[in-house]
Image (cartoon, grey):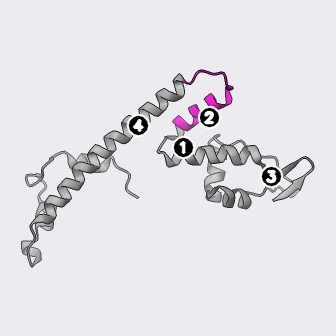
Amino acid sequence: MKQVPGMTTFSIGDLARLTGTNVRTIRYYETVGLLPAPPRTAGNQRLYAEPHRRRLAFIRHARDMGFSMEAIRDLLRLAEAGPDTPCADADAIARQQLAAVSSRITRLQSLQAELERMLETHGDTVGQCRVIEVLADTSHAHCLDPNHGRVAADIDFP
């Protein structure tokens, strides 16, 4: 951290440490316009200030809650519109995210049940292995939910 008359500034490395954000991610957020580009020193080093840290913390929190980049952009616009701006649009964005999360949870519970069922019966060899048998069945006839193949593709696994 550096002291500039009247404010504390941070290098990109300091900002990354303070917010738990990768340096490349900070640069990406600048590139896509979520984080405004900071002023630079004569040596071309970025100088971030407290508003950058707060905005990046907002973005990180929203990302942790699964909001899309576009939803975050909209939420930031609403936050910047002023304290008297109606909250209805922010509520609508959060409701949409809640619906998406609820849907993912339902699909994950279906996958969990399928995996539990797959593990109920097992053999001693690969030739008798229920896991291998179920996964090799491209018709999904052994599955409780024949659509889970499409469901898994929609889920972001870590």
- Which residue position holds label 2? 76
Q: Residue at x 67, y 61 (%)?
A: 17
- The numbered dot on residue 138 is none
Instruction: Decide which of tag 2 and tag 3 comes sooner along the chain.
Output: 3
Give coordinates of residue 21: x percent, y percent. Answer: 61, 56
Residues at discs 3 and 4 in contact (Cβ within 8 Å): no
Amino acid type of the residue that numbered disc 3 sits on in the rendered structure: Leu
Q: Mark 3 and mark 1: span between their CA atoms?
A: 24 Å
Residue 33 picture location, percent across and down: 65, 40
Q: Position of residue 53 (x, y in %)?
A: 70, 48
Lower sequence index among marks 1 and 2: 1
Q: Residue furthest bottom?
A: 124
Whether residues under marks 1 and 2 lie with C-beta atoms below 8 angstroms apart, the answer is no
Percent across and percent down for residue 67 are 49, 41
Query: Sequence-wise, which precedes: disc 2 or disc 4?
Result: 2
Q: Is residue 148 magenta?
A: no
Tag nearer the camera, 3 or 4: 4
Which secondary structure lies at badge 1?
Answer: helix
- At x 61% / y 59%, what residue is drawn? 22
In whole angstroms, how far apart are the C-alphas of marks 2 and 4?
18 Å
Residue hosting label 1: 62
Q: Secondary structure at mark 3?
A: loop
Residues rendered magenta in the picture: 71-87
Residue 147's image quarter? top left
Structural distance between the alpha carbons of marks 3 and 4: 36 Å
Residue behind mark 3: 47
Q: Amino acid at mark 2?
A: Leu
